[in-house]
Amino acid sequence: AKIMRMPPEMKNLLMPRRPLQAFVLAVLVSVTPLAAIAGMCAGTVAGYVWGPALGDTLGWFQLIHLTIAQIAGAIAASALVQGILPGSLNARTTLANGTSIAQGFWLEFFLTAQLILVIFLLAAEKHRGTFLAPVGIGLALFIAELLGTNYTGGSLNPARTFGPDVVLGTFEGYHWIYWIAPYSAAIVTAGFYQLLKYFQYESANIGQDADESKQVFKDAYGNVIGVLETM
């Protein structure tokens, strides 16, 4: 019998690829945030929950449960990807292309911060453009991943990094940056957002959400001080 050998190019097609595994893992991990949104759609969540570090608008009780659910979901999703795809799981987030630990920390910090700020301003703040919040948040995440993927893996979520590491039993010495950076970014961004609210940032463009016939003016305490009628 003649044994047919598989051409190298066919082997390459069958080899597991990182993008495929990373995509499947991202989809599976996203199930937990979506469930959190469905369960707390009454307004306690800012409209979108990407990771435990982004739960700034939750109470402590909900935040603890969300963190546990995210971590458990990430581990389960990683194990599922490991089981249904051939080869070893290749979806870890690690420093690459000569990125130092300090550089990786600040990249994760600022990328997470900009994503959280977009969530606050587009979803937590209610205005005429709120219905477009998913588009703006998606674009913010897309931009963050464009920059972060090649250097830190673009985690922006402690659970995203923790899940694959647990399944593979491999933890880098700098694993801590994927926890400290996002949580630090969440605290700093929450403070910055409160500062914007304190200084009434919306007063920079008064009446931007008013209809065409009436504009309502408010003082620094939110009290209505006048109404402008237009024809």
Image (tube, helix red, strand yellow):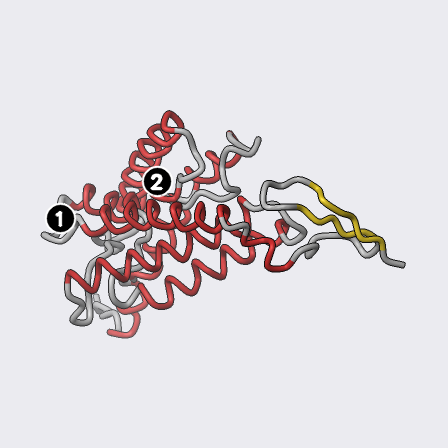
Observer-side mark, 1 or 2, equals 2
- Report the Cα–Cα distance between label 1 and label 2: 20 Å
State which quadrant residue 105 falls in. bottom left
Relative depth, front residue between 105 and 213 = 213
Q: Is residue 201 above or below residue 224?
A: below
Mark 1 sits on what residue? 171
Question: Where residue 148 appears, x then y in whole percent?
Answer: 31, 64
Which residue: 84% across, 53% down? 229
Q: SS of the residue at dot 2?
A: helix
Which residue: 28% across, 68% down? 150
Mark 2 sits on what residue? 52
Q: How many numbered marks are there? A: 2
Q: Is residue 71 left or right of residue 130?
A: left
For the C terminus, the quadrant is bottom right
Sort mark 1 into few (<14), some (14-19) or many (20+) by Cα contacts within 10 Å: some
State which quadrant residue 152 falls in. bottom left
Q: Mark 1 or 2 closer to N-term?
A: 2
Q: Is residue 139 left or right of residue 11?
A: right
Which residue: 30% across, 54% down? 155
Question: Where residue 91 appears, x then y in whole percent?
Answer: 27, 55
Q: SS of the residue at dot 1?
A: loop
Which residue: 71% across, 49% down? 217
> Mark 1 is on which residue type?
Phe
State which quadrant residue 76 falls in. top left
